């Protein structure tokens, strides 16, 4: 069994995070376009809208959670949404994802966030089963969502 630690990401971790984002995007049939400069701004800029946590096995980064800060305006509640959760294949099924989620929950509590959410693709039954096994509450009544794209 692998031993690992979870820490907030540091700017030096961004190339590893970018590589994991590329792997996650490829898994979903997408191509990651995010640059290192954009990641720097997202996670470490003056008004950073996101947080990142990394899982380390010794000095090697084996997982990452990318978390968006969100606000429910009507209730004035702060929340966190785990937009990305990635664990390197060789480190899966060893508690890394569970530990990343637990760290996000702890961080949320520290800053007064009232809810942590995580989503997954409808065609990812492995993630569905893992989140259920962790005791996460499945949201089934979120209602339809719509989007508008703006061409570049």
Image: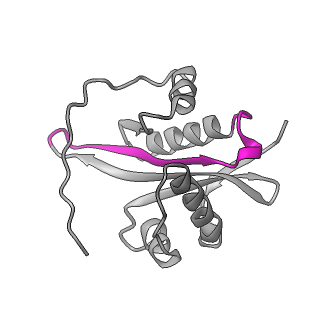
Q: Which residue lies furthest to the bottom in this view?
A: 37
Residue 79 sits inside the magenta stretch: yes
Taking the view exactly as shown, the residue that stands out farthest to the front is 29
Magenta stretch bounds: 74-95
**Residue drawn where x is 25% and y is 30% of the image:** 142
Quadrant of the frame with the C terminus? bottom left
Q: In the picture shown, does residue 115 fall above or below 31?
A: above
**Is 33 a magenta residue?**
no
Q: Residue at x 52, y 21 (%)?
A: 135
Viewer can see residue 10? no
> Where residue 95 sits in the image (x, y, percent)?
70, 34
Name above or below for residue 45 compared with residue 73: below
Question: Which quadrant of the structure image shows residue 20?
Answer: bottom right
Residue at image point 42% right, 59% down? 50
x, y percent for residue 1: 85, 35
Q: Is residue 57 visible?
A: yes
In percent of width and height, residue 36 lies at 53, 75
The residue shown at (64%, 38%) is: 99
Q: Where is residue 24 in the image (x, y as percent from the top left)?
A: 55, 53
Q: Note whether 11 is above or below 113 in the view shown.
A: below
The image quarter in which residue 72 lies: top left
Is 92 situated left or right of 67 in this image?
right
* Quadrant assignment, res 21: bottom right
Which residue is nearer to you in this view: 22 or 100? 22
């Amino acid at each position: 069994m692998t031993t690992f630690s979870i820490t907030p990401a540091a700017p030096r971790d961004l190339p590893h995070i970018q590589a994991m984002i590329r792997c996650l995007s490829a898994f979903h049939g997408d191509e990651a376009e995010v640059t290192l400069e954009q990641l720097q701004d997202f996670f470490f800029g003056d008004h950073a809208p996101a947080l990142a946590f990394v899982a380390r096995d010794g000095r090697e980064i084996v997982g990452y959670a990318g978390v968006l800060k969100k606000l429910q305006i009507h209730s004035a509640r702060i929340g966190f949404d785990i937009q990305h959760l990635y664990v390197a294949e060789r480190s899966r099924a060893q508690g890394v994802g569970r530990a990343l989620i637990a760290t996000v929950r702890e961080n949320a509590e520290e800053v007064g966030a009232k809810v942590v959410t995580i989503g997954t693709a409808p065609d990812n039954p492995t993630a569905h089963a893992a989140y259920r096994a962790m005791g996460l509450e499945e949201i089934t009544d979120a209602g339809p969502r719509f989007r508008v794209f703006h061409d570049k």
